[in-house]
Amino acid sequence: MAPNAKRLKTEGAPPAGVVVCDNLIGGESTPPLSGTYLDVVSPSDGTVLGRVAMSGQKEVEVAAARAEEAFVGWSGMTAKSRAAIMFRFHSLLEMHADELADLVVAENGKNKAEALASVAKGNETVEWACSMPQLMQGKILQVSRGIECRDLREPLGVVACLVPFNFPIMVPMWTVPIALTAGNCVILKPSEKVPLTMRKVGQLLGEAGLPPGVFQIVNGGKEAAEALCDAEAVKALTFVGSSGVAKSVAARCHAVNKRVLALGGAENHLIALPDCDHEAAAHDIVASFAGCAGQRCMAASVLVLVGDTGDLLDRVIQKSKALEPGTEAGKVGPVISTASRDHIVGRIGAAEAEGGEVVVDGRGWAERRPGTWVGPTVIVKSRNGNKGDGKSEEIFGPVLMVVKVDTWQEALAVENASPFGNAASVYTSSGPAADYFQTRFRAGMIGVNVGIPVPREPFAFGGLSGTLSKYGDFDVTAEGAMEFFTNRRKITTKWALPKEATMTAAAAAGGGAGGKTDTANFVGQM
């Protein structure tokens, strides 16, 4: 739970300034059947921003039934008509970008520049979804004389998206606009820590012209998430969160033969070679591990220094020490909750106890009140010590482990030993060196002189399957999401070849049933 968050049964109106975040079901704001709510608390100062509905299986069943009803009409529309709504939604997101960013700052703690960037990045995926009428077209081929094969994409039906607290709008936009434009109906369960941003997004989708029941929000915690995994009406489910929960979600969905993509945690490595641009690399490294308070699955976790890298580490240390707490642009915001803060501080202490040298110590920020803060922290591991954090759970905070090695092979061994397989980058001025690492990293997303190697559309996001970063099928965003949220129907057609002697004069001239185009009918289809 967030700091001071509590469950409560409510009667009467909430205090002034406290937003009630009910479910969005069938186009209507719908309270939880239990009457139970959870406080939504600002990680910056501990104030109560709102109360979010804590729903369960019954609310999921109602939402799924509404979605099944809405699916008939929504899937029956052309992709072009659905994309037209996404175009309007894209414009509304641009118009309300500042308001949405303020909600992200309030409930998540990002600084304003980070929040605005997350809104813009989410809207890039909406923009990609607008192009889907052209991208969804199938293939057609005459495979033999008189035999034609073709395929076409069809929506799955009702789908669910379970999203985390760290990007209240960007991560939902990885999936929601693509699933909708493909013709599916979506049930979203936001993190109960940050429901306010997507509450506003749901309103904007309605303003854009989305029919009731096509996009719904069921708020809640574990009970609601498990109900969505189990619901027979839900044909596919995406999840982004910790590796342990991702594994559990994937197993639960697979048990009922549900399509699932569950993205877990990460331990991302940055490899710095002696020939890299030290100033540019230091700037990137600090931005990577400390940006968004380290609460992103693409944040740097381990910096591997190869050979003599001169003053690179000193530059990283000085830039880290210069960072200040706050939610203004350029500052480092709070972590999401008291539990998160205590977890990060505990992991720093454990690394120190194992022999790590804490050269930048952010634990002092944890004493800041109100709010939940941890400052940038840099820990240098001994050469004979653990080559990473050694845990199967990511720290998920502004903490960078530094490892020193002598050779490329040792550096690669450090990265390859990670069980996560999410992302890795190398800093170098050498093309052959870059090629050596980018073809040998055990990671799904790789960078060269890039601290956050996030693929941008049309490339999809995702780590390596079979690692702790990814359970299930396909990638998320762009083409990966389009594959995930559609089925391909394959059609093979065979017609008897006409015998020339039996062809009527009208058919031979293009008349009769196969003759001239009915002009009025053709125009009506345009």
Image (cartoon, helix red, strand yellow):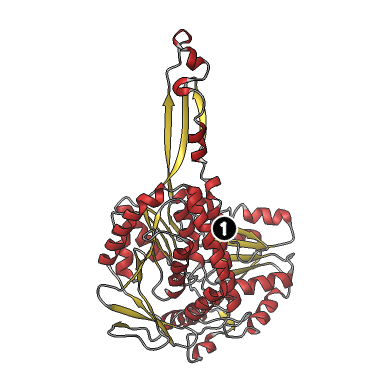
Which of the pair 123/316 is nearer the observer? Answer: 123
Q: Residues within 10 Å of mark 1 (few under 14, many from 20)?
A: many
Q: Left of 125 or right of it: where is 472?
A: left
* Residue 257, x across and y down, in percent: 32, 50
Whether residue 526 is visible, yes or no, is yes
Q: Residue at x 48, y 16 (%)?
A: 506
Identified by mark 1, the residue type is Glu
Indicate the quadrant where residue 203 lies. bottom left
Which of the pair 228/147 is nearer the observer? Answer: 147
- Identify the residue under disc 1: 127
262 vs 155: above or below: below
Element at label 1: helix
> Residue reaching furthest top?
501
Which of the pair 227/526 is nearer the observer? Answer: 526
Q: Left of 413 or right of it: where is 394?
A: left
* Residue 26, x across and y down, in percent: 34, 63
Q: Left of 188 or right of it: where is 505?
A: right
Query: Quadrant location of the N terminus?
Result: bottom left
215 vs 12: above or below: above
36 vs 488: above or below: below
Q: Residue at x 51, y 45 (%)?
A: 136
Indicate the quadrant where residue 316 lies. bottom right
131 vs 104: above or below: above
* Residue 270, x across and y down, in percent: 61, 66
